[in-house]
Image (cartoon, coloured by chain):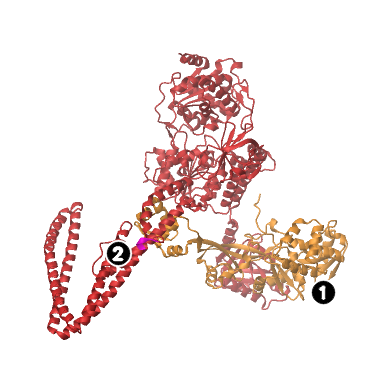
Amino acid sequence: MTTATRGRKVFPARRAVEHVAALPGVRPLRLFPVLWPLWQVETTASVDDEQGYDVIDRFLVRALSEAGLSEVGELASFFGIPVSLVQRCLAFLSAIGHAHVDDGTVRLTELGFRSAKAGIRYQPKESRQDVYIDQFTARPLPRRYYEGSVPIFATPSVPEDRLSDRSRFTTLFAATSFREEIVRQLAERTDRAEFNLPSQLRDLRVIGQRDAFLPAYLIETADSGLFVYTSRAAERDAFFEQACRQIPEIHYMIDAEDRTDPRDIWTAWLADNHVGLGTLRRLSNGVWRAMLRSDAFGPSGKLGLSRVGSYALRERYFLQLWSDDAGLRRRAVLERALAMTHGTGIATKADLQQAVTALARQLEVAEPSLTEIRRYAEQHNMHTGLARLDALD
Amino acid sequence: MTRRTVLLPGPLAVIPSGTAAEQLARQPPGPVRGGIGAVISEISRLGQAGALPARIDTVQHQLLVYTQRHKVSLNLTKFRDAYRLRRLAPLRFSDQEALSQGALLLHCPAGWQGYARVQDLPGTTFSYWETIARAWQAIADSPRASALPPHHAAYLDLLAEVVEATKDIEIQRQRTEPPVPYRRKGSAREERHSARGVYGFQLLRPTSLAAGAPVYLTDDPGLRGRVVRVGDGEVAVRFDDAIDYRRIPAQGALQVLPSDRVYRAQLDAIDVLREGRAADPYLLATLVDRRLRPYQPDTAARPRGRLDREQLAAFRRALTVPDELLVLGPPGTGKTRTITEITAASVARRQRVLITSHTNRAVDNVLERLPAQVRAVRLGNEDAMTTRARELIVESQVVSLQQEVLAATEGAASRLAVFTGEDAPLPRWRDFLNAQVAEAVAADGTVRAHAAALDAAIRRADPALASRLAAGRSTSDRARSSAQSAESDLRSARQRLATAQAHAHTRVLALFYRWLARRQQRAVSRLEDRLPQAQAAFCAAESTLSELLERAYEAAAADPETGPIVAARATASAARQRAIDEAQRAAAMVHAGLQPVMPAAEEAPRDLDGLQQYTAALSRAVTLAAQRAHLLSEWRARLRDPGEELHRELVRYADVVAATCIGTSTTPLLAGLEFDLAIVDEAGQISTPNLLVPLVRARRSVLVGDYKQLPPFLDHEVEGWMKSVTASRETAPAKAHEVEDLLRRSAFEQLYLSADDGHRVMLTLQRQMPEPLARFVSQAFYSSLLKTDHPGNPGDPIFRQPFAMVDTADRPAAKRAERPAQRNEEWGGRGYVNEVEATLITQLVTRCAGWYGDWAVIVPYRAQAGRVADLLTEALGDGAVVAENIGTVDSFQGGERDLIVYGFTRSNSSGNIGFLSELRRINVAITRARRQLVLVGDSTTLSSARDDKFASLFHAMTAHLRQYGDIRNSGEIADRLTHLAGP
């Protein structure tokens, strides 16, 4: 029994294709799912944790800073508490660096005074945080990659329960070695907060490092361009695209991959998938489209309704699944609109409207309004989708 | 690490074959500029940068190196000093995939050089094949770097599975419990320790609810609490919060609250281990791999009391063991004493100790024996604690702290009251004082100014007088200073004298100091003589000066020019004096007010400068006193209603925290707290999931227990689940074995048996049982290792030895036979009753119990316990006493008695002994006896038992009884008992 990994699924390849295909003037050719190698560097730093004082410590500290008391015995008799209790409280305050006890006399440290004045018990704590560095370019990843929803794996393979389609990811290899000064230099940058190292962290130190892998899709375009998509957002990933420009190996490897005639692949696919009759067409932007019968989609067909206008992938090539039935396509838009309500990046009704507009354009239908989407949900008893739709701002 | 850098210091050579060049030309997307030469230069460049990826293809016996575009296959030449470049292939994604599984990074500072033919080799190149191959092998051998080794993860998964299964069974059982209706509610007699409400409910029918069960009201599920008492048709419930009595329905029902808090605690502990957050990072390795670290015991450590040899060994090891120490403590070997000593010594070393166990009673046992100076806190359900332990719960400690503080600071608070508040007198006096001093200073200034003017006028008018005045002034000044120095000389001389005198009594060089003291004494006397003279001289000088001044001022006053000045000066002088007098009065008031709180020095000086300084000091003191007054009144106010923070603090400052295993997880007061040492008592009875709960919070631990006594409780439904798992064909045999092990054996037993001698100690000197009994127990259960120190048991009226048996085999089989019981036992199995034995036991207890301080009857079956209880209540009349002293083994954990009567109960012709086959239960039962053990049973059935292990135990027992004990027939005993009854 393997322990289920927690976290979101890797976002499916076909969404990346959808995005690319919609970009004007772009001719996408092939898609390469890769695991991008990162260094996951475990660092430790001191940070002042803010805590509230309890009772005895607060009063002892006030007695030391305001009331001129300084002997353990004095403190005990002033507050009417046993000496042993005072001693243990002072031991605690010493342990967190707020006080010095020297043969019965107590002195507050600078930290102790600062805390007393602020009324907040600052406790220097060790904070551990991971820093992700691209192994190829030794550049640190910006803060947006640290969100919990971005899947990053510790081994060069994606666990099955995190895959949302049957993409097979190949792992890239960077012939570089980790050097601690990469992190040291990062720590000295004034903008380091943009890389998930807030300024409150002091004395940053590296304590360990291991590999980590970020799933990404490399999409080769006709003019030898390379677009990169990661799970961080349903849009192009500028950081990794820039990295790719500095890594010639990637381009060489893409070139070295065997090219096949897409027509052969897709004919075979149609046959294998028993979706009925379909004709293959090549669009002006180079994308291949299969025109299928309406009954290939939906509950009675082989493919779900939401696959209309979306893509099938095989051997790094992709095929758009299409139907001439505009009504069918419109229904697909409505279905997918409801599914989008729980996607990342959709927090408000405006977000949803924007996404729905793009989708409608992709499926070449008129865009539905939110009321129409709502009505669709009601008609089809899609309660959860309806609830989420209403919950959007 | 799946990546390793390999340093190849010398130059490497590569000889490209002809085919390679052709391949290069043929490959898309076109010929590489510069051809093979360029490839080789790239290899060299990468090698020099330490970034040349390489792999070994063990099948083809090739070295593969990777450039940005190509995968280059290299074969060793015949003389192994160079490589032939046979093949070039374009770099592909699959190559990178292979590299990420394992790769070497070659660092070749001397570079790679291409040569056209083998003959061209300079003879100074190397291939470093062995180095590379070795490094490659190391990668292949190294385990895949992962956060948690797979077998550790598997262990945790198994534990979680067992916990989940147990939880599901328990929750299901709780859900199917029917509600318990009540017809009346009322307040209950229970003790209250906090604001939580305790109410009683009169039931319609008897219930199986037990004390400690969590319940809620069916009609208002928000009202939840715990049963504290069941009896007389009433159930008392202590609610979780202070609830509104009116909210409770007048009639309704109580329902058992399905509570998974225990299981959540266990699962949390498993998660802590999984995430590597346990206080002891090696804990998981210890549990799974049974790896313990070597260390040295603290041989210099001494306990406060006396410990025997093994107790001392355990003590010394416990203080330094870095991971787990296992102490096997058979009955009566002084486990509690050892634990107490270890705790006290650890606290003295400033360590924070957690005392925990399976039952509340065991925890309280240790707690009550701790020395007074140890600060201890008891956490948990107060109804399950002893009275003394209850005093140590946080709430009680807060209450007593409150009382202490308010009482102790009462006096100080009232003394300081004069410093705070709206109309506080002392600050006003202080302000008045300051004002007067300011006035005096101002007047003084005026006086000086006038005096100066006057002096100038006198000089003009009568120079002779002026010069006499000046002379007089200087004389006076000199006399003043010599008087002052005489004073200070005297002071220091007195001080030196005092020091010398003190040292004369106490120091080593007493003689010297006494001589010094005498010298000082003479000096003091001289100074004392001199002082009055100096003071007198000063007075004289002063008075001469005054006379002169008088005359001068008289003359000046007459003069119309200086007259006004003199008058003004006199006025100012008078004003100054008035102000000084007022100031002194005020200072006296302030001083008096300060005296009780902050003894201020001396009295107010009379001169103005001194007075100013004195006033400033007083002023500061008053401000400080006001701040202290303020602080103290806030403190007292806060203590009246301290809140949860004080609870947390008291726990944090405690040296010892005592709680049951599950109790350590379910209280928020322990959040974030870690312990330097955990001492776990009764460890043999604690299942691994329960043990993990406290153990993940401690850096190291001492487990004390006895796995020859009761094992961890195995619920019969859980046992059923376990059997289904082990029998299922889907389960691998290894896993089935592990599941069974986990449920049947405690972690303590597993660790003890696999530990090295440095990590385990067996206590062997028992002081509880009489020797004949102990010897048998030692042979049967403890490999004959137990020794005894016991006074024996003289004077039993019937039995000649402390270890005795009454054999019912002399009765007819039908009479002495068992009878199946009406209701089933707790664990769902069938119960039995044995009338003959019950009667005999009743007679024994009735007649003999008077000879002993206390007694108990232990039988294997609840049904039999009930029967004996009925008979004994008839005979003795006191149902409560009887109920407390009769039961099955489980109700007698750790409780010893002077007289123990154990009835085997089973008597049949087939040798069925059922429940008795759990030999450890028999061990527990018979070792409860402090002075006399009487067994009652049918030797025919027992010696022919079908269970082999029981049969051999029984044979050994009877053999032992014949030699060292007293085995008698039931008939004879019955007669003796009747005789004893007498008048």
Q: Nearer the viewer, residue B679 or B913?
A: B679
Q: Nearer the viewer, residue B77 or A320?
A: A320
Evaluate whether label 1 is on the same chain as label 2: no
Number of residues whose C-alpha sits closer than 10 Å to that of mark 1, classed few (under 14), some (14–19) or many (20 or more): few
Residue A181: give x, y in percent of width and height. Answer: 53, 69
Residue B385 shown in magenta: no
Q: Chain of mark 1?
A: A
Residue B293: give x, y in percent of width and height. Answer: 48, 49
Q: Chain of mark 2?
A: B
Of all residues, the one furthest to the bottom in this rendering is B460
Residue matched to label 2:
B586
Quadrant for residue A236, please give it. bottom right
Residue B884: give x, y in percent of width and height. Answer: 52, 29
- Going by the numbered disc 2, the residue's amino acid type is Ala
- Is residue A17 visible in the rendered structure shown here? no
Numbered circle sitting on residue B507 = none
**Residue at 48%, 41% in the rendered image:** B363
Q: Secondary structure at mark 2?
A: helix
Image colour assigned to chain A: orange
Residue matched to label 1:
A284
Q: Quadrant of the C terminus of chain A?
A: bottom right
Residue B329: give x, y in percent of width and height. Answer: 47, 37
Q: Is residue B789 left or right of residue B951?
A: left
Q: Which residues are magenta?
A: B423-427
Give the spatial CA distance, label 1 vs label 2: 104 Å
Quadrant for residue B604, please give it. bottom left
Image colour assigned to chain B: red
Q: For the stretch drawn in magenta, what is the main secondary structure?
A: helix
Q: Nearer the viewer, residue B160 or B871?
A: B871
